[in-house]
Image (cartoon, helix red, strand yellow):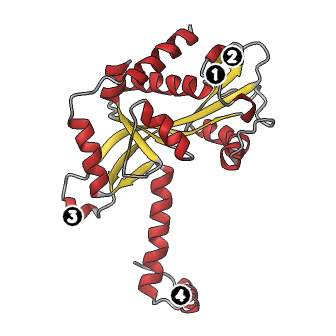
Amino acid sequence: MENFSDAGSVQIVPFDRKINRNDFSSGNLNLDQWLKKYSGQSEDRGQSRTFFAINKNSSELLGYYASAFGEVSSSEADENLGESRYSRPAYLIARLAIDSRWQGYGIGRLLLFDALDRATRASSLAGLELVIVDAIDEQVVKFYEDVGFIPFSPGSTRLFITMKRVVRSS
Amino acid sequence: MRISKENHEEIKAAAKRVGQDLTSFITDAALDRAEQVASERNIFKLTPAEIATLEEALAEEPKFIPALHELMQQGRKAAR
């Protein structure tokens, strides 16, 4: 378990329509539906980028994540903050899912590595202060916390890690 | 805000149907739309407490996280 090689030769590749998305089943309907129905549109519009974990030999889709740039700002009305509206540039791992047949093989770790590695490279091109993830359940919150992510508030499933921490630990 | 008589009547009727006055009906609708636009642009609204948590993390001397280091090293090895 937790060994990338157990799933065969795994490769991370950018979104590709030739890779079959229809049989993908992570057990989370939202994540599966988004991949099948909306990932292509989102890719075409440049709203987000999706990356696939595939079996190098068979091209079977094992997992995916979608990332986008975003920002955090204040929920308080802007007028209370005067000119200096609160804003921090962020890299968002919007969705991350593993096919249920391949859960427990460390593919989520490999996808997270890929996303953090790309975020690190992006941060050298333009300002980027944090990475945000949305965890689908408590178990996933624990997974992110173990590698240094911090919940925005106690019990929250939205977590962040500072780019400085990623770079320092890379 | 300029609005045609027809539109005004239609909005007023809809507000009445849900028991709201015109101002709160329009404000609610506009706020819903503003929230939708914000989420499309990936803007995450944080409460003051959440901002404090984030600012504390941004201000600190970055910590070395062994488990993250291991994940990054494993990933690099696998990506080769």
Amino acid on which disc 3 is placed:
Asn
Rendering coords of residue B36 (x, y %): 50, 60
Spatial CA distance of label 4 from label 1 is 58 Å
Rendering coords of residue A51 (x, y %): 61, 28
Nearer mark to the viewer, of 4 and 1: 1
Badge 2 density bin: few <14, some 14–19, many ≥20, Cα 10 Å? some
Residue that carries the numbered disc 2 in the rendered image: A6
Instruction: Tell whether A65 sits left or right of A158.
Output: right
Amino acid on which disc 4 is placed:
Ala
The chain that hosts pointer 1 is A
The chain that hosts pointer 3 is A
Element marked by disc 1: loop
The disc at residue A1 is 1
Residue that carries the numbered disc 4 in the rendered image: B15
Q: Are marks 3 and 2 on the same chain?
A: yes
**Along the line of sight, the residue nearer the viewer: A134 or B41:** A134
* N-terminal-most mark, 2 or 1: 1
The structure residue drawn at horizontal position 31% and vertical position 52%, both measured from the top left corner, is B50
